[in-house]
Image: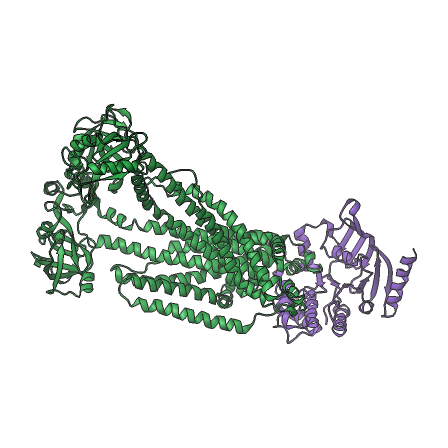
Chain colours: A green, B purple
Amino acid sequence: MLRTALRNVLAHKARLAMTVLAVSLGVAFVCGTLVFADSSAAAYRAAASKNFADIAVTVTPKDPPPGATANQGTDVLDDALARKLTDVPGVALVRPSADGSATLNAADGTPLRAGRAWANLAGAYVPGKDGRDSRYPLAKGHAPRNGDELAVDSATAAAGHFGIGDEVTLATDGPVMTKRLVGIVTTKDTRVTAGGTLALFDKATAQRLFASPGNYTGIDLSAAPGTDQFTLADRVTAVLPAGRAQATSGAAQATRQATYVDTLTRGYEKLPLVFAGVSLFIGSFLIINTFTMLVSRRTREIALLRAIGATRRQVVRSVLWEAVLLGLAASATGFLLGLAIASVLPDILSTAQDTLPHGPLVIGPRPVVAALGVGVGVTVLAAWLPSRRAAKVAPIEAMRSAEQPPSTTRSRIRGVVGLVLLALGAGLLISLTGVKDASVENLQSAMFGCALLAIAMIVLAPLLAAPIIRLTGRLTGRLGITGHLARENALRDPRRTAATASALMVSTALVAGLAVIGNSTGQALDHQAAAGLGADHVISTRTPTTRIDPAAVQRVADASGVRIATAVADSTLFTGGQVRQISGIDPDTVNAVMKLDFVSGSAKDLGPGRIAVSTTIARQHGLSTGSHLNAGMGSSQDVKQYTVVGIYKDNPVAHDALGTRTEVQRNSTTPHSVQRILVRTDNGTASRTTETRLRTAVGNNPLLKVQDRAELVHEAAGTMSNLLTLMHGLLAIGAVIAALGIVNTLAMSVSERTREIGVLRAIGMDRSGIRRMIRLESVTVAAFGTLLGLAGGLFGAWAVGALANGAMEQYALVLPWGTLLLVCLVSLAISVVAAAVPARRAAALSPLAAVADT
Amino acid sequence: MSQTFPSPGLPATEPAARATGLTKAYGNGSTQVTALDEVFVEFARSRFTAVMGPSGSGKSTLMHCLAGLVPVTSGSARIGGIELSLLKERELTQLRRDKVGFVFQGFNLLPTLTALENITLPLRLAGQQPDTAWLETVIATVGLAGRLGHRPAELSGGQQQRVAVARALISRPEIIFADEPTGNLDSRSGAEILGFLRDSVRELGQTVVMVTHDPVAAAYADRVVFLADGRVVDELHEPTADRVPDRMHRFEAQDHTR
């Protein structure tokens, strides 16, 4: 049977090539992603081990405080300890460090690669015996020698357009500092090379900023030749003050850092894997369709095999072997394609913010196994149904010449099953539209409903083909006899038409659904971000540890063009095991800067022990005005009882709850500072000038964001750009696979209809007529898939959207006409393109084909 | 039945189709096979001619050449005075559509179209509306009224071939080529089809050329042309089912003794 399978595969090379391509596309995404992940992990690991190459052991304070910038518990690692460590046998070099985070302003005054404290590194330049710090080789200038001097690494200097001698403004957590750039160093630290920044101070300054005067945040030790890292770590641990400091081996540290960076980049795998899943899913239709066509074409041959004694099982096995061979071919091509994808992925995924490391491709066993498993597995699974059909071929069919009409009982069963699934899916989705919150369970049942709906559509598609194509046929029918014939040909085998259209249907549904939800959510976010905001400008902090001091608030209030500047203290409210965000405001001025819509009560009644909550919180905790809520505020350890004096409609500017600023500040970890300043200008509009003035008022602190309303909206919508990428990627993948499927089906149809096309040519249809007929058939199939997909996608989007409606106040179904039109045009385009080759082949057929003996 | 042929504008002496020194060779060099070797034959208007000959005699090739389905190697093939070798692909298609009708052995109807749609297909390809009176005449001639809404799969072989005959008649072509039209039919249906073809000649003035190897079928014709080894070897007027095999045997015998 293997030999028969091999012969069959070889006999249908061209036909199977399309199927192989479709499967290999999916395999390529899987392999590409895995190879990419392995390669980038290896690159990070290699880079990390370079960082720690000469560090055998690092000593750090025990139980380091959360956040590198906090100053507590850093009085252990002093010079005395450093000297003591020098005497430990096997220690070759002792290098103390004082590390933390600093955000710099670029030369043009805008924050440089800001927003991620973990990548905005800062440290001390600690000269060794030779007067140099071996971690940071100087490329230019000299090392910082006093509190006014600064060194940065070459990449940072390039990105910020700094030169030696420039004044650089930067901030660690508090006020802004200005230092003179005196040196440019190089570094191998992966956090910096992957798109971070590095600022180096002199030892005393760094100690003051990140530890405490005279103390370090860590001490790196390198081992003398012949001394093992772990032995050294043990020896060092022995001399450390017990319970206050700890020793970690360099190897362990390298691993930890690599894992850390690794996790940060792991998110990049998701998108290609989604593509892989979708392309495999759509591709499996193509496989099913191809094998079904092959089986039905070989009915006589199979019947003959059965007649001469092949068992059903042998027939099934022969078909499955064919699938295995096909899968192997798909895996191989997919794997190669995947390597190509893996080598370009770093460039595609790298942005100005994140540079992914480029390294040699690492091909582990994982992608190889995945390629084989996915390629062969999917193909064999998809070929299983057609193989069952092949087994059902009765030996007597070898003697029959006419094809049997499809059984009506089977299509009745199909109809019943499809309708039941449809009813279940649609019912589930509709029942969810009444639900008012987007909890995980509800989302899961929504997804389940969508999946049911999709399967129902796939099952029902062959039955829907006839009525829908008759409808579209009214249009094509106007194009004369070619249109009429195209429609009839598409209707000839509804199951095949439906299977061909399925790829397009699924991708259209996905894209249309995503587009609608994305568009609606985007608009809602836009509305929402702006809805609650009465202020023209918002000054906020980039990191949770950054503070705005009262002096800065005063300077903002005094800035010209500012009518009102209200400080808001942000903190947390622990209640019922949940963490809520509370905003501390000034009840007298809040209405000028926030558009609060109170359902009951008012902001005027806020005071000590009296808070207001959003409608969502009120619903979840069953609160109403006048009721009490037990909660812990900010860093305060004890739970207090708060009286609810007002309930306002959800407002992203006001967060979950409102309190007075004094009370919120009192309980906060940063009692004297605030987190936001909401600014109302004199003329009620935002402008560049005011923005510059405000920036100046906060001392050009790179850790503070000064945004106007439009920027705030833009930031809120930022998450949508991922969805857009996903959508367009899916559209492209769907189009490619659908095109392959259409080419496949049309080629099969043309070769089956050779005689008919010959007749048409003989009795007077010209070549362009034949081409037009095939093209129109392709367009008909594509239109069917697209229509069904749009219907399903829009229904799903409506149902899931209704769920979002509960979660998002401003959500309304907004149809993205542009994207929907694009989807239709793409379908039309691929159907025409896909028809090109089969149409050309059909047109080239000689009219003699009609009279030739078959 | 007032509709008659030939169509106006042609000299009365011009036959519906004519082969002059028609040669058709397949392949080249040592593998070259000459299917037709300088054939001279004319098919007069409003006549039913049968072309007979053993397998490989070139009778089908002659038909293909005269119908413009394959290009000739040398010599001339004309339909109603039009030299086919001078026509481009598109013009040939048009000629087949307007001036030639076909009846195939395997019926070759389009399975997706109804009987009526199949009949009017050549007109629709030409972008014309069928002439109602003529359509009714044709349908009446082949006796298909009542089955017009059916698809080919729902018709018997004889009925399908009747649809094919009607399809050939509908555009009032210069000439109808019938390639073994009874080959796939039982004798009764075959006789019916042959009757329709003969009626179309006698009553409608149609010109029909039929390729066949069946003497009984050939006997329906006004004239039989015998082909052997790519040449016209004999001819018989007013054939009967008895005389045709006689002639066949005669030149087949000559063939053997040569």
Q: Residue furthest left?
A: A608
Check the image and name the residue furthest to the bottom.
B146
Which residue: 28% across, 67% down? A435
Q: Nearer the viewer, residue A736 or A24?
A: A24
Does residue A807 sit above or below A711 in this rendering?
A: below
| Residue B150 image position (x, y, % from top left) | 62, 72
State the residue in front, A849 or B113: A849
Q: Quadrant of the N terminus of chain B?
A: bottom right
Q: Judge whether residue A802 can be spotted in this image.
A: no
List x then y, in percent, for residue A244. Answer: 17, 41
Locate residue A580, reporting x and y percent. 19, 56
Name which quarter of the figure residue A140 lies in.
top left
Q: Tell me if A511 is positioned left or right of A206 in this view.
A: right
Q: Quadrant of the C terminus of chain B?
A: bottom right
Residue B167: x percent and y percent?
67, 66
Q: Residue at 29% across / 68% down in the picture?
A: A434
Mark count: 0
Horizontal side of B245 relative to A197 (left or right) equals right
**On screen, residue A182 above or below A334:** above
Whether residue B196 is visible here, answered yes or no, is: yes
Residue B60: name its quadrant: bottom right
| Residue situated in front as seen by the camera: A607 or B211 | A607
The residue nearer to you, when weighing B75 against A639, is A639
